[in-house]
């Protein structure tokens, strides 16, 4: 997509990891997207694996998943607060 101001053409890697303004994706945005995509399936797998390992009953799978999700959100928001 053309811009109003002329800019030198950059490679995909440069556009992704060396962003110069808000329109360009950054490494942090890629990591955030990766976390968003992989966290829920991973937490479901961990919750069910805890049941299979005998750590808790089948009725506790959903609360275990909820606990993992809330804990991860607290950790992510803490990291975001500290680093920015």
Image (tube, rainbow, N blue to C red):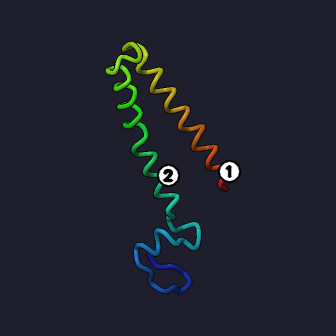
Across and down, in percent, residue 29 comes to 51, 58
Residue at 56% across / 84% down in the picture?
5
Across and down, in percent, residue 53 comes to 34, 21
**Against 54, is 20 above or below?**
below
Please give left or right for residue 58 compared with residue 36 in the image: left
Q: Identify the secondary structure beneath mark 1.
A: helix
Closest to the camera, between mark 1 and mark 2, is: 1
Q: Marks 1 and 2, how far apart in space?
A: 16 Å
Q: Which residue is mark 1?
A: 82
Across and down, in percent, residue 47 comes to 40, 26
Please give left or right for residue 83 compared with residue 50 in the image: right
**Against 75, is 51 above or below?**
above
Across and down, in percent, residue 77 comes to 61, 43
Q: Residues within 10 Å of mark 1 (few under 14, many from 20)?
A: few
Please give left or right for residue 59 compared with residue 32 in the image: left
Residue 71 placement: quadrant: top right
**Against 8, is 65 above or below?**
above
**Against 25, is 59 above or below?**
above
Q: Residues within 10 Å of mark 2 (few under 14, many from 20)?
A: few
Residue 83 placement: quadrant: bottom right
* Disc ID at residue 63: none
Dividing the image into 4 quarters, which one contains the N terminus?
Answer: bottom left
The mark nearer the N terminus, 1 or 2, is 2
Residue at 45% across / 45% down in the picture?
36
Q: Which residue is mark 2?
A: 32
Residue at 47% across / 20% down in the picture?
63
Residue at 50% across / 64% down in the picture?
25
User: Which is nearer the eye, 40 or 3?
Assistant: 40
Dividing the image into 4 quarters, which one contains the C terminus?
Answer: bottom right
Q: Identify the secondary structure beneath mark 2.
A: helix
Circles 1 and 2: CB atoms closer than 8 Å? no
Residue 11 placement: quadrant: bottom left
């Amino acid at each position: 997509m053309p811009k109003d101001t002329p800019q030198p053409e950059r490679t995909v890697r440069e556009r992704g990891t060396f962003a110069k303004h808000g329109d360009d994706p950054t490494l942090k945005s890629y990591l955030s997207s990766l976390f968003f995509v992989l966290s829920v399936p991973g937490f479901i797998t961990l919750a069910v694996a805890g049941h299979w390992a005998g750590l808790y009953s089948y009725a506790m799978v959903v609360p275990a998943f909820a606990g993992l999700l809330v804990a991860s959100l607290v950790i992510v928001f803490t990291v975001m607060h500290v680093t920015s």
